[in-house]
Amino acid sequence: MLREFRDFILRGNVVDLAVGIVIGAAFTAIVNSLVADLLTPLVGILFSADFASLAVTVNDSTITYGNFLNALISFLLVGAALFTFVVKPMNLFERRRQAAEPDAPTTKTCTECASEIPIAARRCPMCTQRQSTTLTP
């Protein structure tokens, strides 16, 4: 039983998941600091308001909708920060990587009639000439 447990723990996907969670927690701290320490004060300068004090009382019940507005603004700032500093650069990186890798050819040229045929074709559909297995660009 201990051997099975050890094998389970040392599987690649379990270790990868654990590393991902730890890195995610560290990244969360960075994003939260970016939002709380940089972006939220900038929004405060622009709007010069703290919504935490906004509330309405109905039948001795206090509805603090200002806290909801603060949470909503924080959520939007976190989303904007992630989009700007993570998603956009990763998309740019991926586009550059894909542009650097040429696509694999899907057709080849018939050795007899010079027509374009599918790469997997064994015979040319135009002239019925038998094709070799090597690629002819």
Image (cartoon, rainbow, N blue to C red):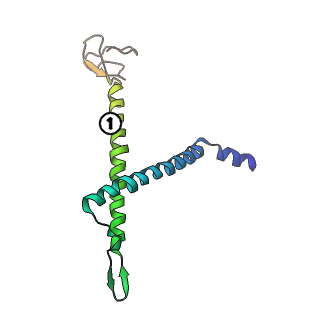
Regarding residue 38, the answer to whether it shows in the image is: yes
Residue neighbourhood size for the residue with mark 1, other residues' Cα within 10 Å, grouped as few (<14), some (14–19), many (≥20): few
Q: Can you give x and y, in whole percent of width and height, for residue 66 in the image? A: 33, 71
| Quarter assignment of residue 99 | top left
Residue 89 to residue 65: above or below: above
Residue positioned 33% across, 18% down in the render: 123
Q: Return the residue nearer the eye: 1 or 38.
A: 38
Q: How many marks?
A: 1
Side of 18 relative to 102 (left or right): right
Residue 39 to residue 107: above or below: below
Residue positioned 25% across, 62% down in the render: 47
Which residue lies most toward the top here? 112
| Quarter assignment of residue 132 | top left
Residue positioned 40% across, 51% down in the render: 34
Residue 22 to residue 101: above or below: below
Which residue lies most toward the bottom here? 59
Side of 110 relative to 19 (left or right): left
Q: Which residue is mark 1?
A: 92
Q: Return the residue nearer the eye: 92 or 78.
A: 78
Regarding residue 103, the answer to whether it shows in the image is: no
Residue positioned 32% across, 46% down in the render: 84
Q: Quadrant of the C terminus?
A: top left
Residue 4 to residue 49: above or below: above
Q: Return the residue nearer the eye: 75 or 42.
A: 42
| Quarter assignment of residue 127 | top left
Q: Amino acid at mark 1?
A: Leu
Q: Can you give x and y, in whole percent of width and height, for residue 103 in the image? A: 34, 26
Q: Can you give x and y, in whole percent of width and height, for residue 88 in the image? A: 32, 42
Kind of element beneath mark 1: helix
Q: Can you give x and y, in whole percent of width and height, for residue 83 in the image? A: 34, 48
Q: Return the residue nearer the eye: 81 or 105.
A: 81
